[in-house]
Amino acid sequence: MAGGHDQTGSRIGMWLFLYTEIILFGGLFVLYAAYFHEYPRAFAENGRELNRVIGAANTVLLLISSFTVAASLTALRQRAQRLCMGLLAVSLGCGALFLVNKYFEWGHKFAVGLYPNSPAMAGAPAGKNIFFGLYYVITGLHGLHVLIGMSLLALSLVLVHRQRITADRVTILENSGLYWHLVDLIWIFVFPLFYLIL
């Protein structure tokens, strides 16, 4: 009975934590909306500087990873340990590819001087500096959350392998999956705000 209470408390704690994460990104999206209202043309013009193919590819990667995380939980409940581990490995691979894409995207932007207060943007309009400032803050913070989510999934994978997470003890994997789904959900908002802006 105590174990059931512990699992319930853990789930409630995770939902409360996710709520604070939603508030954090929600605040950043409100800030984005305020500046977009002030500089709509600059935001649209600078959004075209971003690579939509990479943005779309990263969206697909996170959607696939969310599916495989959910499927890993189903596999574990059906006591298919190896399948669960394989699906978690696919999720981790998708997360790693997401970060590699982001690394090359950021690297290219820095190479051509597209970052706030760079020499190339010293005389640029305020809207351009603000757009790229928000781009780096929001996508950088999201990238950090991807790293944290991957760490949780990797831990879950190890614990499944050691049979510390089983069909009867799934809370850690459930909570890790919830966090990963939040990471995916946040990107679903980030992608159109920066890459598909008109």
Image (cartoon, rainbow, N blue to C red):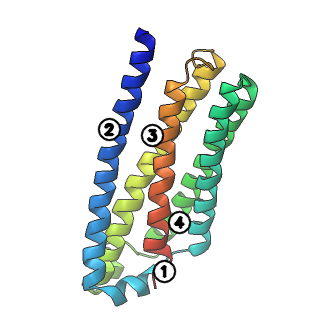
Q: Count residues near mark 3 (Cα–Cα under 10 Å), then give few for <14, some for 14-19, many for 20+.
A: some
Residue type at the position of mark 2: Leu
- The structure residue drawn at horizontal position 63% and vertical position 20%, both measured from the top left corner, is 167
Instruction: Name the mark on residue 49.
Output: 1
Of residue 65 and residue 78, the one placed in the foreground of this image is 78
Instruction: Name the mark on residue 101.
Output: none
Q: How many numbered marks have been drawn onto this rendered protein structure? A: 4
Compared across the picture, whether 197 is left or right of 42 comes to right
Name the spot of residue 60 as percent of width and height, x first: 63, 60
Task: Measure the alpha-carbon separation of dots 3 and 2.
Answer: 17 Å
Q: Count residues near mark 4 (Cα–Cα under 10 Å), then give few for <14, some for 14-19, many for 20+.
A: some
Q: Name the residue under label 2.
A: 16
Compared across the picture, whether 117 is left or right of 55 comes to left
Q: Mark 3 points at which residue?
A: 148
* Circle 4 or circle 2, nearest the eye: 2
Residue type at the position of mark 3: Ile
- The structure residue drawn at horizontal position 65% and vertical position 52%, both measured from the top left corner, is 64
Task: Measure the alpha-carbon separation of dots 4 and 2.
Answer: 33 Å
If you read the primary sequence from the N terminus, does the residue marked by circle 4 or circle 2 appear first? Answer: 2
* Circle 1 or circle 2, nearest the eye: 2
Instruction: Determine whether 174 is above or below 161 in the image.
Output: below
Residue type at the position of mark 4: Glu
Q: Do the residues labelled 3 and 1 touch (CB within 8 Å)?
A: no
Q: Count residues near mark 2 (Cα–Cα under 10 Å), then give few for <14, some for 14-19, many for 20+.
A: few
Instruction: Determine whether 124 is above or below 140 in the image.
Output: below
Task: Measure the alpha-carbon separation of dots 4 and 3.
Answer: 20 Å
Q: Name the residue under label 4.
A: 105
Name the spot of residue 196 as percent of width and height, x first: 50, 77
Task: Measure the alpha-carbon separation of dots 3 and 1.
Answer: 28 Å
Q: Is residue 59 visible?
A: yes
